[in-house]
Amino acid sequence: AQTVTQSQPEMSVQEAETVTLSCTYDTSESDYYLFWYKQPPSRQMILVIRQEAYKQQNATENRFSVNFQKAAKSFSLKISDSQLGDAAMYFCAYHSGYALNFGKGTSLLVTP
Amino acid sequence: NAGVMQNPRHLVRRRGQEARLRCSPMKGHSHVYWYRQLPEEGLKFMVYLQKENIIDESGMPKERFSAEFPKEGPSILRIQQVVRGDSAAYFCASSIMGSPLHFGNGTRLTVT
């Protein structure tokens, strides 16, 4: 079974600064997808960024980027120029086949 | 294009009652997934359905829980004889093959 580990239950960042959220996963497969989802207090699950395992280039979406290290099975999320609206729970997820496996999440606090 | 619609948003049931959670997938999506989120946890996969078929229910408790996705109408997650441990947020997601999952806003079930 694939497992996803987020070792940081909580993180804090000042507005306009950069923060990195960690994620590691365990799998024996070579073809899979990795995702970061954001869950604000509204409870909605919002897709932040997606990475295909066969792509070496790290995915980027505006202020969000990932550092994908396939050999190390590491998939960290970097948020640049943090904004107050970035405050939320962030979940890393592994996808192979059809089921998404989620980590336990990291709560991100953004301070003015 | 409306997103994944879940209702009700909040549901309160007494122990022993039945809970029915509804999910209308995005237009054109034929794959539906149900996830459960316990407090302080990530989402846990429960069941994956296509129209009129259960593809994988490996995450579903063996008793009291059932799911369907009929030819017409929404997908239904049914929990019979609810217990306090069933209190959680239940999320539905939909997709077409090969695309990321789109999540609804969830139903928060409270068992009193």
Image (tube, rainbow, N blue to C red):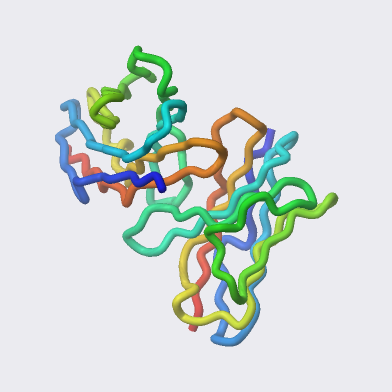
| Residue at point 38%, 53% (across, down) | B42
Q: What is the quadrant of residue A63 in the picture? A: top left
Instruction: Establish if A98 lies above or below B76.
Output: above
Q: What is the quadrant of residue A65 in the picture? A: top left
Judge by depth and name the residue closer to the eye, A24 or B76.
A24
Q: Position of residue B51 (x, y in %)?
A: 77, 47
| Residue at point 41%, 48% (across, down) | A1
Q: Position of residue B65 (x, y in %)?
A: 62, 70
Instruction: Establish if A49 lies above or below B44.
Output: above
Residue at far right of view: B72
Judge by depth and name the residue closer to the eye, A81 or B23.
B23
Q: Position of residue A44 (x, y in %)?
A: 48, 47
Instruction: Answer with left or right where residue B75 lies relative to residue B104.
Output: right
| Residue at point 79%, 52% (across, down) | B52
Residue at far top of view: A57
Judge by depth and name the residue closer to the eye, A82 or B91.
B91
Instruction: Establish if B112 lies above or below B35.
Output: below
Q: Position of residue B70 (x, y in %)?
A: 80, 54
Q: What is the quadrant of residue B74 in the picture? A: bottom right
Instruction: Answer with left or right where residue B62 lies relative to residue B1.
Output: left
Viewport quadrant of the N terminus of chain B: top right
